Image (spheres, rainbow, N blue to C red):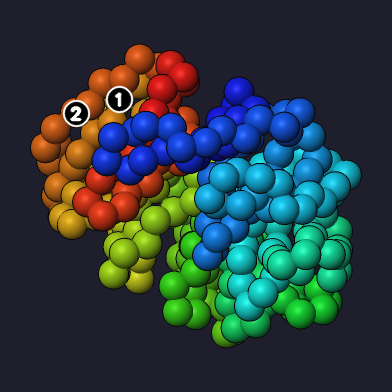
Amino acid sequence: MASCDRGVYAVRPRTGRRVWRQAKARGAYHASPVVRGRTVYLGNDDHKVYALDAGDGRIRWQYDAGSPVWTAPLHHKGTLTFGTLAGTLHCLSARRGELLWTRKAGKRIYLSDPAPWRGRVLVGTEDGRVRAFDGASGKPAFSLAAPGRIGGGVSVAGDRAYYGTTNGFCEAWGLDRRKRLWSRRLRGGTIYTPFVEGNRLYIGTGAGLAYCLDRRTGEVLWRFASPGRTGRVVVEKGLAFAFSWNGRAYALDKATGELQWTLRTGEDLRGFPFIRDGWLYIGSLDFSL
């Protein structure tokens, strides 16, 4: 896990016991690390992307992107692609950290993790565009216009792309024909990436709502309200987990939105909790995992 205290931590999954901590970066981490094989990849406020040894946390290489990196890198076919707050998209060799290409993608790439589609890389920007680039060369492929700023990432399922905007829209596009399929106005904007499972889409908003939409039509199937902003929503084994800036995690029936249980932590849950092997891991602003 990565932290705003400038540290990257490896812990035992069942006990939480620390294995190692790497704290040589000069800034905070805002996105989740990406692990492939024995290497951990992640970007930092100090403008650098780091590749760490998963066994001991040793830095294998580092790359200076010239601007803070708030996205989780996309590891795909031996390359590593990520965006910066300066609006640039960079593609590196995952093995050595050598630059393969870089492109200006927009005004700012905030928490919009790059997404792959048919050999291309899609990224949302704060100037209200989804831009696609050839993954091998970086050549611009196409651009889609959103009705507001895109703070989070684009979810791709088949030939459809889904995203939310900071002014409260959730949209679906057919990528083959570059056609907007539906646009749904939600209460509250979002800076988080929609979660897609089957024919449903789950997304949280700043108005404290977790939504479940039919991803084919955009119809609202249910919504769950809580005090404070709702951040990331993830789904696992019949439950939708909504994480709130009020310090609570809510487990909801994914079909109906009915509350099953609540977990209270000390502070905001505004990061990126994840589920692995039936365990839910949550980082809180109370400095605890």
Residue 262 point in image, percent of width and height: 19, 28
- Location of residue 158 with respect to 70 vertically, above or below: below
Q: Nearer the viewer, residue 252 or 4?
A: 4
The residue that disc 1 covers is 248
Q: Is residue 156 visible?
A: yes
**Mark nearer the N terminus (2 vs 1):** 1
Taking the spot 35% from the left edge, 65% from the top edge, the residue there is: 215
- Location of residue 74 with respect to 286 vertically, above or below: below
User: How packed is label 1: few (under 14 Cα within 10 Å), some, or many (20 or more)?
Assistant: many
Taking the spot 55% from the left edge, 60% from the top edge, the residue there is: 38
Q: Nearer the viewer, residue 29 or 20?
A: 20
Residue 203 point in image, percent of width and height: 39, 48
Amino acid type indicated by mark 2: Thr
SS for dot 2: strand
Q: Residue 262 carries which label?
A: 2
Q: Nearer the viewer, residue 60 or 220?
A: 60
Label 2–label 1 contact, CB within 8 A:
yes
